[in-house]
Image (cartoon, rainbow, N blue to C red):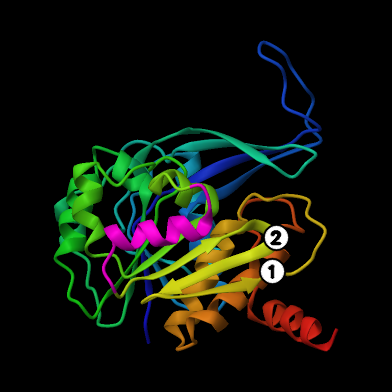
Amino acid sequence: MPRMLHTGQVIIDLVMAVDKLPEKGGDVLAQSASFEAGGGFNVMAAAQRNGLPVVYLGRHGSGRFGDLARDAMHAEGIRIGLVDRAPRDTGLCVAITDASAERSFVSYIGAEGELSAEDLASVTVEADDYVYVSGYSLLHVGKAQALVDWTLALPDSVKVVFDPGPLVDSPDAPLMQALLARIDVWTSNAVEALKFTGATDIAAALERLTVHLPASVLMVVRDGPQGCWVSQGGERRHVPGFKVEAVDSNGAGDAHAGVFVAGLAQGLSSFDAARRANAAAALAVTRWGPATSPGTDEVDALIGNSAND
């Protein structure tokens, strides 16, 4: 059975809910605060909860945050591919959600920002696995080159999924240029796609992405409550979203990405995988916290109820 091999970063989120962000030099009181596993954990949990076995190929630290990260992965059934703990602790992200359900982040990278060629050489990759690469990884000098070299050497039977994230804003960086030719599945939100391509709308962004990516690449670009756009080989299709009452957008894109890959790995068409991903993202925004992806049964129920409306 295919697996997701996730090469990104699991960090710990300090999740806080506020009415509004403070002004510069100001202070506000939060309605809630908790430590939760986040970062790449959110995508992995979404995939695992929807039937796709997951292996984490990132580093994890020695300390309280590393313990929290490992405990969360073990609880989800995610296998940790690199057993040895790094000397430093796992990093931290302060994730603040305001009354509009919009979130803001401040991150500090720890042990997860390092990964060596020797680490990756110890990994057994199987045919039909999905290797998930995060744009955040390309920003860490302690892992980026080794990760790209390893990814480029993967056999063609292994599908490479790329999520640019909000900080990779151009195809021009050398490592990004090298990786582009090996991407099989592109998953991003609209803002990320527009920033990466310099386009002003999703249709133009999808068109410009084809200039940089292989002709056979499958692209999915999320469009918030409107759903997402799926494009491959010149065929483009809008997949509608689901109407819900949003309380927290944190983790919704990760839920979408994880469930989308899970659907593809289970043999679904890109449209059906995207519809399941839209349902998962819709349910995720109705819950507080980062790793709020629903499981298979909840996704099935929302799609079934929608069909009956």
Q: Amino acid at mark 2?
A: Pro
Nearer to us in this view, 121 or 127? 127
Q: Amino acid at mark 1?
A: Gly
Is residue 213 a member of the stretch shown in magenta?
yes
Q: Which residue is mark 2?
A: 225
Q: Main secondary structure of the magenta part?
A: helix
The x and y percentages for residue 83 are 31, 58
Judge from the rendering whether residue 279 lies leftward or rightward of residue 113; answer left or right.
right
Picture mark count:
2
The x and y percentages for residue 184 are 31, 70
Residue 60 in view in this figure = no
Judge from the rendering whether residue 169 lies leftward or rightward of residue 107; answer left or right.
left
Element at label 2: helix
Badge 2 crowding class, 10 Å Cα cut-off, few under 14, some 14 to 19, many 20 or more, is some
Nearer to us in this view, 248 or 219? 219
Q: Which residues are magenta?
A: 200-215
Q: Which residue is mark 1?
A: 241
Locate residue 58: give its quadrant.
bottom left
Element at label 1: loop
Residue, x 71% and y 65% (percent of image)?
282
Residues marked 1 and 2 touching at CB (< 8 Å): yes
The x and y percentages for residue 153 are 14, 65
Nearer to us in this view, 90 or 130? 130
Is residue 219 a member of the stretch shown in magenta?
no
Residue found at the far right of this picture? 309
